[in-house]
Amino acid sequence: MSAPAPGTQQAMRRRNLSLVLHALAEEGSLSRASVAARIGLTRAGVSALVEELLRAGLIVELGRGRPGTVGRPGSALALNDQGPCGIGAEIGVDHLSVCAVDLRGTVRARIAVDAANRGRAPEPVLAELNGLIQQITVEARRAGLEPAGLGVAVPGLVGRDQTVVRAPNLGWQGVDLRPLLTTALPVTVDNEANFGALAELREAEWRDFVHVSAEIGIGAAVVVDGELLRGAHGFAGELGHVPVRPDGPACACGGRGCLEQYAGEEAVLRAVGIAPERAAREHPGPGGRIALLARRSEAGDDAVTRALGDAGEALGIALAGAVNLLDPQAVVLGGALAELAPWVLPRLERELSDRLADPARTVRVTVSRPGAEGPLRGSALRIVQSVLDEPPAAA
């Protein structure tokens, strides 16, 4: 058998380096022998890969292996918490936030500011965001981290070319954010629900799920066998604009009776007689209005509890179609829905159960572990993932 071409050998080596990194990302720490057993390579082969990763500063040796292991103990390996890191940014309707996440998935620096971005032009928003990115980059480097890229989460339709095709709640259309970012880092722009799903995937026990993310708008991401389902144009998962009542109120997207008009934050506020504009002034920043609704429900406010139940019913109607079509293991509620789950879930689950194609089937509905932080963490984890998938060569 002839030897593989040099390009093939190099690709195989990089793939094997990636396998080692992913094994450590999943387990936290492993000995060389455990890595070899896990990825199906010889111990000698793994040792060569480990040495290269040590030289590249991507992994570290922690000392003796885990207690209780059989045989001669070896030094444990782990991802380097002072090596490359991901910088993540989120552009919200009412806030901007930036964080740095190391290769182990730990948030090492974070900053968030209130920002009234609705109707604001992209240029001043990105100018403010650039300042926050610079602050976090400086903090990351002080902590011994080196940013490897920037992920930016946006509440709207983001095409495969990373253009923000439409962000109705911001008032943006056809905007390429990358030229407005002053960083020299590689940039990845995506929908906030997709990034939220990536954060969930890192911690979840399932690999097939629908992740619903709600703040002022409602988005969703579909994960199939551990991979995001993007669709032909990159728009898969626009649950907020699925019509639940075709003769309902007009939506910013141009349709009528969309889910967002019944289960979005502003829709719930209006249903209980609270003007969203007033609520934004009196309870500014991310989560302010959601906390208000939660407090009122906890205090026994029947109007708020009823409005949240109605939102759950509308979500159940929209999700029934997605569940019947995709057959996921679970539905995960993120964003604002995570905090409002006690009042949203009962009617959501009942509506969903009544509409499943197989009456005997149940689908798990659960609350996101990262919660409202999911999109921000996921945007940074996307960069971490790229380092694990395509490890840089040793110097």
Image (tube, rainbow, N blue to C red):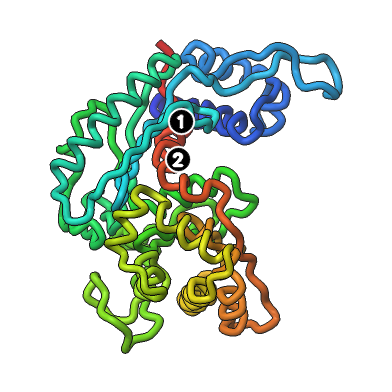
Q: Residues under labels 2 and 1: Cα distance?
A: 7 Å
Query: Does residue 177 sit above or below 253 in this rendering?
Result: above
> Residue at image x 23%, y 56%?
170
**Amino acid type at mark 1:** Val
- Residue 101 badge: 1
- Residue 26 in the image: state x and y as whole percent: 62, 36
- Residue 146 in the image: state x and y as whole percent: 39, 19
- Residue 74 in the image: state x and y as whole percent: 75, 14
| Observer able to see residue 246 | yes
Residues 73 and 83: in front is 83
Q: Residue furthest bottom?
A: 247
- Residue 191 badge: none
Upstream in sequence: badge 2 or badge 1 = 1
- Cβ atoms under marks 2 and 1 closer than 8 Å: yes
Residues 331 and 2: in front is 331
Tell me where residue 292 sits by quadrant.
bottom left
The secondary structure type at the circle numbered 2 is: helix
> Residue at image x 70%, y 11%?
63
- Residue 54 in the image: state x and y as whole percent: 53, 13
Residue assigned mark 2: 377
| Observer able to see residue 4 | no
